[in-house]
Amino acid sequence: MKLQAPFIQLPFLFDASRLLAEVNALDASCWRDHPEKFPGNFALPLISRGGDPQHDGFAGPMRPTPYLERCPYLVQVLEKVGAVWGRSRLMKLSGHAEVTPHVDVNYYWHDRVRVHIPIVTQPAVRFLCGDDEVNMKAGECWIFDTWRMHRVINAADAERIHLVADTVGSERFWSTVEHGRIPGVEPDRTDWEAERFAPQSSSSLPRLACESANLPEIMTPWELREYLNFLFDETSPHAQLAPAKQLALRFITAWQATWAQYGSDHAAWPVYREKLNTFEQLMGHLAAPLKLFNNMAFLQALNGLTVVMLGDRRHARLLQQARQVS
């Protein structure tokens, strides 16, 4: 998600030692290699599709995994932050490992922010976003602008572990963000203080609000228009920009007419697919030289949109997987 600043610290301070105790109580076999197999990067699923730790995807109803259910303070921390949670994990970075530079340009990240709460860290862990850099201290709570180029470098010998939780937010969450601190902009604020949140005594865990809907079956023309306008607003000037906008406008008009006729009827998937394939083919030639202000290729971000606009291939893949299991 594009934010007003590279980093924003939220006004919470959690008990990192208690979080670590819960993490250490989980068996080492719970950790998995990073989905992209980046060296020294490991993950432990806390909220995943259907609560299944084996599912690492973004689509489908997100629910707590059995690992999270064994960590009462972790649950309390997520409830305190107060958001609707998507895929969330513990992320481990080995000593002298890194998260390589990248920008989150796919559809999922357009409306989602990533919350970081360090559990184990050292001063030598560097989090870089755009031109800014912070060292997130244990127990703090941060969000950052995933639309900018970002990376993490662990220059220490010891590992780094963060709670990393994805969310669209909530009214309460975004109200909290308004009271956050932007490092370097307000360094001398005397009225800002993070609220300490200790483990709460309770016989039952709070019920977390989790995503049940995240990817469209058929994207509405209104969401399509908003997303494409965002991409064009983020595109550097170029001679091909105006023709690309005209092509996109014609496509939006055609998509809206199809929506008016069929709505979200799955039976109309072939009609939508034909229009989408034609648009992708034409735009692939026209917009190839376009670049975003964050230095990513326009077509890469556009592909992050078009792959989720229609659920036909997603459903075909799930059906194939179900047949393989049976």
Image (cartoon, rainbow, N blue to C red):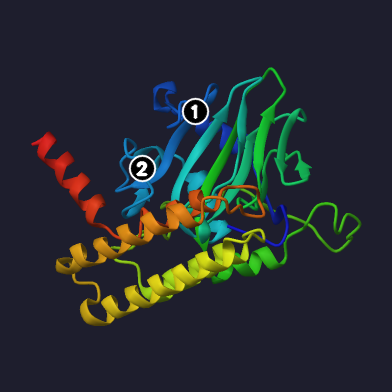
The span from disc 2 to disc 1 (Cα, nearest Å) is: 17 Å
Which residue is at 38% across, 74% downward? Answer: 221
Categorize mark 1 by other alpha carbons within 10 Å: few (<14), some (14-19), many (20+).
Answer: some
| Tag in front: 2 or 1 | 1
- Residue 226 visible somewhere in the drawing: yes
Q: Residue furthest left?
A: 326
- Residue 206 visible somewhere in the drawing: no
Q: Residue furthest top?
A: 157
Instruction: Tell me the residue that label 2 is attached to.
Output: 65
Instruction: Tell me the residue that label 1 is attached to.
Output: 42
Residue 315 in the image, given as x and y percentages of width and height = 21, 52
Is 43 on the left or on the right of 308, as rendered? right
Q: Quadrant of residue 55?
A: top left
Categorize mark 2 by other alpha carbons within 10 Å: few (<14), some (14-19), many (20+).
Answer: many
Q: Quadrant of residue 164?
A: top right
Q: Quadrant of residue 251?
A: bottom left
